[in-house]
Amino acid sequence: MKHSSFYKLLDFLRKIAPFLLVALIFVLIFFYADELIARPGGGHSHRGGGGGGSRSSGGGGGSGGSGGGELIFYFLRYAFPSFPAAFGIWLFPNWSDKIKNNAEKIGRSVGTVAGIGVSIAIYQFLDLGIAYYMAGIVLCVLAIGYRFAGEVQIDQLTSANPSSERQSNVNQIDNAIHSIVERDENFSKVLFLDYVRGLFHQFYFYGNEGKLSLLTPFIDNSLLLTREKEWAETGQKVSELVIGNAYISHVKIESDRIQRIWVKVESNYTLTNRRGAASRMVIEESWEMVRNADVCSLPPEKMQVVSCPNCGAAADFTTAGSCRNCNTTIKAGASQWYLNEIRVLNQSQFQTQGLGMYEEETGTNFPTIFHPNLGEQQRHFAAFHAISDINGYFQQFQKDLVLPVFLRIYEAWSNKKWQNARHLLTDFLYESQNFWMEMYQKQQLSNRLEKIQVSKIVPVKIETDKYYESITFRIYASCLDYTIHDKTQKIIGGNNSSPRHFTEYWTFIRRTGAEKTESPLNNCPNCGAPVDKMGMSGVCGYCNTKVSSGEFSWVLAYMTQDEVYRG
């Protein structure tokens, strides 16, 4: 951040470089016109000394017009031979930056050398003097400067600053959550977000039925009444709800009384009006969750579902907040987080034609966002699991888990066999990605991912709490990424010959105490049976055990694009 002014200056100079080039050449020609014209082919030596008189014979006005024409003529004359060299340095690397493999790097070098070679050949063929070479050097220096400033802009200005701002916010959140954990050792970010996602689904499900009051202890009373009234008046129904992402955006602790956590939830659902007309909506909301500061978090079985904090029965409360199963009255915030406010941040209609559209990767060159306390996290993790060589452990972790799971998941996606990856994913991630798989199928499209290559895997964050551990990696990869129409086999987006380079942040979770590192690709992590009977809910058909919660081994919880990863 402290160098942002310098990078902005370089970016500004980069943008005005072509104009500086033109201005500089005009200045050189204006001040050194006589010397330039005296070179081989110039006016004085060609005219044998008569040029001076003839230049002034037309009077003042005529001299001005003739001089302007000469400036343009000399600009084109002196700048033109150096254009191939400047293009080789400037334009060719810009084209090739999109593909960073060895062949392209060789091509970049050949293009640069060829451009310079062509310019030198022009100079020699036309027997041009030193003035031409000076103009060419100036042009090439500016081209090099343009390239340098452009790379600085990509690597520093547009990447470092946003990621630094995101990371600063994450640090504030981590510090606030640490304060919560100091008072409540049972607090788990994994379980808290599971609870919010569950409440999100229940909120819209019961809202459709006009039974939002069944969730009385978990929703602020004024919000509950307002939403019930709105839905009754509009008659709109929400169905096929899918949560795309949910993350903590802000935490606030008000002395020793109240704890507030804001969660941004990105979702899409089908919205049907009274007349039966349906449309698919994409919506981003901010949910403010509140509880009393002296509350101790509930165990996992009561956090992963919306249930009575006392007896654990499914949420079924009277308007007074009494559980119909155990008759216990639950006050909002007294034993569980409750929803205090909803703010709609963005809302738009989903466009299915966007499935075949491809945009340039914007975060591939962004600096990696490491947790500021990664070293301490590694030492804590190593001590807890009695690991003597943490670097060796992570190398084996990447080989046995991250790489195989990465390849299997991309294979399952490309072959439209998403069920083959069910046991490797949490419920939330499986359902959110399965929505997109269904969208492709409805549009009779297939997203092909071929020739997948992983070049680097970097651990960036480790989080542990009483119930869960999570490890996040940044994965550098490339593949042929294109979309075809199933019937015509016509490519409607992407490229089946040029690799697409990208990076993603993948977060794996498991229950604290589960010591399996590898995640069996073809077997149930509990009974070892084949995964051919793995249900949609992540329950093994052989041992009837749910394996998608991280109870037995690591499962993938988040796949985050590099340009939006927050740390």
Image: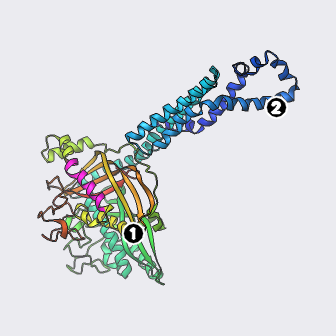
Query: Residue under circle 2?
Result: 65
Q: Is 467 left, or right, of 124 in this rendering?
A: left
Q: Is 170 left, or right, of 122 in this rendering?
A: left
Q: Which residues are magenta?
A: 397-412
Q: Using the rendered image of the protein, determine whether residue 386 is visible from the camera's viewpoint.
A: yes
What residue do we see at 29% from left, 59% from top? Answer: 411
Q: Tag 2: Cα neighbours inside 10 Å, few (<14), some, or many (≥20)?
A: few
Q: Is 552 left, or right, of 417 in this rendering?
A: left
Q: x and y percent of residue 524 in the render?
A: 15, 63
What residue do we see at 45% from left, 68% from top? Answer: 352
Q: x and y percent of residue 468 in the render?
A: 21, 56
Q: Quadrant of residue 121?
A: top right
Amino acid carrying mark 2 in the image? Gly
Vertical placement of 205 versus 141: above or below?
below
Which type of secondary structure does the marked residue at label 2 adopt?
A: helix
Query: Residue under circle 1?
Result: 439
Q: x and y percent of residue 451 in the render?
A: 33, 52
For the residues marked 1 and 2, what is the alpha-carbon distance in whole angstroms? 67 Å
